[in-house]
Image: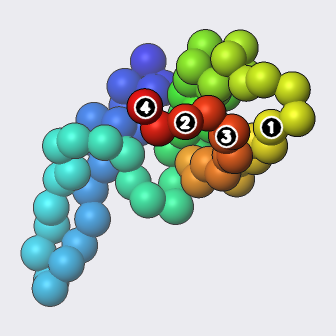
Amino acid sequence: ELARLVLKENVFVYDQKFYRQIIGGAMGSPYTLTLANIFMWKWERQTILSKLPCHELYGRYIDDVFFTSNESEI
């Protein structure tokens, strides 16, 4: 219920007018940051870490990803 409330009831003011954000969460919101970290943690465990060979580098800061690969592009 809290997630629904935070994601559906986000409003902001721009140029003295009220707007309601209808897709996604507010940038900089502590709750949105937590949701992004949960999503990225699940994604990296399913997609990256299980397939990452040894001697490869992988790092993440919030939703930015860095990794190396020795595989060919073909």
Residue toward you, 71 or 5 = 71
Residue 42: tell me if it is visible.
no
Residue toward you, 43 or 9 = 43
Q: Quadrant of the C terminus?
A: top left
Q: How is the image coloured?
A: rainbow
Q: Amino acid at mark 2?
A: Ser
Residue that appears at 17% across and 43% down = 22
Residue that appears at 31% across and 42% down = 24
| Residue denoted by label 1 | 56
Horizontal placement of 55 versus 44: left or right?
Answer: right
**C-beta proximity under 8 Å, tags 1 and 3:** yes
Q: Amino acid at mark 1?
A: Glu
**C-beta proximity under 8 Å, tags 3 and 2:** no
Secondary structure under badge 3?
Answer: loop
Q: Amino acid at mark 3?
A: Ser
| Residue denoted by label 2 | 72
- For this orientation, the residue located farthest to the right is 55
Horizontal placement of 3 versus 36: left or right?
Answer: left
Secondary structure under badge 2?
Answer: loop
**C-beta proximity under 8 Å, tags 1 and 2:** no
Task: State the image coordinates of residue 54 (x, y, percent, origin top left).
Answer: 87, 26
| Residue denoted by label 3 | 69
Which mark sits nearer the N-terminus, 4 or 1?
1
